[in-house]
Amino acid sequence: MKLQHRFVSILGALAILISLASLITVQRSISAHNTQQLESQLSTHLQASHNFFFEVINTSVSNLDFISQNVLTRQYFSASEQIRYQLFHSELTRLLEQYLKKNPLYSEISIVLPDGYKDIFVRRDSKFFDLNDFDMSYSSLASNNLSDSENRIIIIDEHENPIILAIYQPLYNYFQSNEKDFSIIGHIKISLDLQAITRTLSNRQLLTSFHYRQLEIFDQDMAQLADITPPFSNHDQYQYKREKVFSDLYIQSTQNGSILTETSQKLFWQGLTLATLTVSALLLISIVTLQRIILKPLNMFTDVIENSNIDSYKAEHLAILKDYEFIRLGDSFNKLMDRLKKSSRALKSQALTDELTGLPNRAGFYELIRRLKQEENVQRFSVLFLDLDGFKQINDNHGHQTGDQLLIAVARKLVKVIRHKPPSDSHSRHSRNDAVHRLGGDEFAIVMRDDSQAQVAANRIIKELQQGFQIEGRTHYTGVSIGIAVYPEHSKDIDLLIQYADIAMYDAKRNGKMRFSTFSPKMAEWEKKKLSIENAIREGMEYNRFETHFQPKINCETGEIIGVEALARLRDKHGQLVSPADFIPIAQEYGVLEYITYIVTEQSCQLLQILGDPGFGASVNISPSQLSDLRLIVDIRKILHRYGIETRQIEFEVTEEELIINEFAAKNNLEFIREFGFKTALDDFGAGYSSLGYLKKFRFDTLKLDQIFINTEDYASAASIAVIRSIKALAITLGMEIVAEGVETQNQVDLMQSLGIRNIQGYYYSKPVTAEAFIELYRANKSNIESVYTVQQLALLKRSK
């Protein structure tokens, strides 16, 4: 007889004997055993439920104390309304979300104002709650309080579904001068899901429920699992125990006792004894049988497996089982090992390959760096970090599918630029020396063995990506900022080398994007400086250190000041000005650019009100994304109304680089604000993605010629003059005023006059100055304009002062 048949015959006989014995004994013993245990189980379960419930209450009270005493909570209620919602609202919300996440029995944490309005609230599952921001039970706290404590209120909130137990902690105004007059400025509320608590405490045999007046609160699924249906207290088959936890609130443990019988108790020990003897005998027989027939060859099989691994295993290792009936098992194991080898190679390849683009991923990038460092013939190599400029806007405005297609197109372009083709054999992906990697999101990395070609490759990449990508019939433009670090010149430590490449990439972004930067120690110093600037921005918002400087626009033929550009400035805690080139990108990164726009707009309106000239206007720099913010535009109009300023006196300046990220949205946003009466200007034309076609796509009132055409060594060359004339001609045809920026010398003024460009702006006449200095300059200009001053005379007048 085969081993399989013998094994099945023996186990079959054992199963029959065990089944017969179990059928007689188990049927009579279960009910008797449960009868003895029922009373103990109910008492133990009720006590455990009672302790758990009050542990949750005490934990919630402690959390309420922590939240109310948190510095962020105090700062939130002590700050002005504007600062509160700009700086602390999101941070306090995240704090409440952390407590909600750590406490699964919480259904909601909220801050309720005295009028019942929920100023901040976070919820676990909004589909079970009314999304009204008003606390329906707030007005009846005193009358429904279940607690004897004066410092907190505990109520059963029947307005919520499911019913909750709400704990309110009062918030006192600690900022009043008289401590005896501390007033309540709101409550912190934690809502406990009673149904979730019963679900946590219930099991297959015991159901936990709460009883409040005429209500029974329990989990339907757990009740069904325990075969218990309400009402729990009026059913003969149910055994229960109940204990009071608060006024009118009881906790109860219930069990279905229908399975109990009196006669099963007498046979329990008889059946148990018989079952024990039977099982003992069968186990003894089974052990002897298994040892001789199965365990001996299995031990040999185990030894082979323990001494083998996927890479070194060979089918010959199981040849020792040829004398036993384990040959089929050995064959099956050999096939399994073959499949595991293939799966292992595939998994390793997948682990090192980006699923979207097919490029090696971050893990593959680190593996290549480590391998290059270990190779004896590799003395130098370069690491290039790439981050796409404007990808987030494309992804947000056109959808993730378009964003994915763009990433695939960029990946192919990068591979093409560095003349690298991915291998067709996916099996070798993990072992190749790939040059292009996708690290995640819109970040890529390139490893180049020939470090002398790193900057050449970076320039080619920037040039190629400027051409745009055709995706679903639409051209999308995305720039790239590149950081370069060289091994071992910059660092022999791999992590530091990668960090330095990342720092260099951010330096490229800070210096205007669409460029590359090679790491230098000064960049590491910039990271420290960046932290200082972040602190200066936060303190600037808190202590009103943002201010506006004004640079006049001049008619170079009459010398008249015809307008002004408002420029944001920030002072640190020592009163020193922080460079706008430093703090503006950081402010935009941290989402506080809107606050700066408010400040600049309001101070510009204050200046225009003092000047009292309805024909005089101010230009304010703004991003196209802000133009789509209806709330911002409405608030700006309120500022204009407050100071009696017409919308036509405010001109919003945007740059080309920001426009091409999403041309369709930018065009709609510009038309949107023009309908309100605001003017628009295209700033820094010619600095980045310059194209005369943009002048036709977008309607602008003013075109500001970038200083690259004026403040360079070849500004007077025939080519430069021809380009300027072309731009001027098209601007005039499209009905746009043209302003030349960056004018610093007399020769540049003369050139602009010769080209018929009358309006200029630059240091030749005045650098950006404070509002007081500009008012003095403006009034001096107005009082002397009748003498027909030239721009040179006005400059001399300013210098003499």
Image (cartoon, helix red, strand yellow):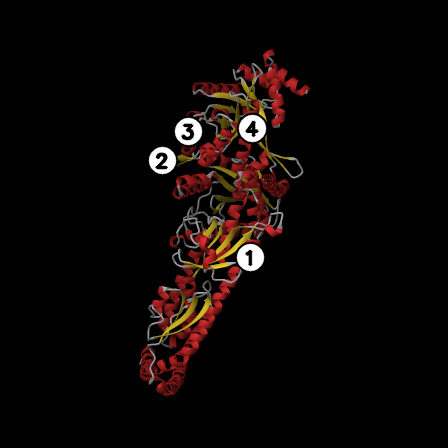
Instruction: Say which of 396 and 9 sits in front.
Output: 396
Q: Is residue 323 above or below residue 68?
A: below
Q: Quadrant of residue 237?
A: bottom left
Q: CA distance from mark 2 to mark 4?
A: 47 Å
Label 1 SS:
helix
Identify the residue position indicated by label 4 in the image.
606
**Is label 1 in contact with label 2 (beta carbons under 8 Å)?**
no
Q: Amino acid at mark 1?
A: Asp
Q: Is residue 91 left or right of residue 321?
A: right
Q: Is residue 275 above or below residue 312?
A: below
Q: CA distance from mark 3 to mark 1?
A: 52 Å
Label 2 SS:
loop
Q: Which mark is residue 50?
A: none
Identify the residue position indicated by label 2 in the image.
473
Label 3 SS:
helix
Dot in front, 2 or 4: 4
Q: Is residue 29 left or right of residue 797?
A: left
Q: Residues within 10 Å of mark 1 (few under 14, many from 20)?
A: some
Dot in front, 2 or 3: 3
Circle nearer the N terminus (4, 3):
4
Q: Residues within 10 Å of mark 3 (few under 14, many from 20)?
A: some
Across and down, in percent, residue 510 comes to 56, 37
**Is label 4 in contact with label 1 (beta carbons under 8 Å)?**
no
Q: Which mark is residue 65?
A: 1
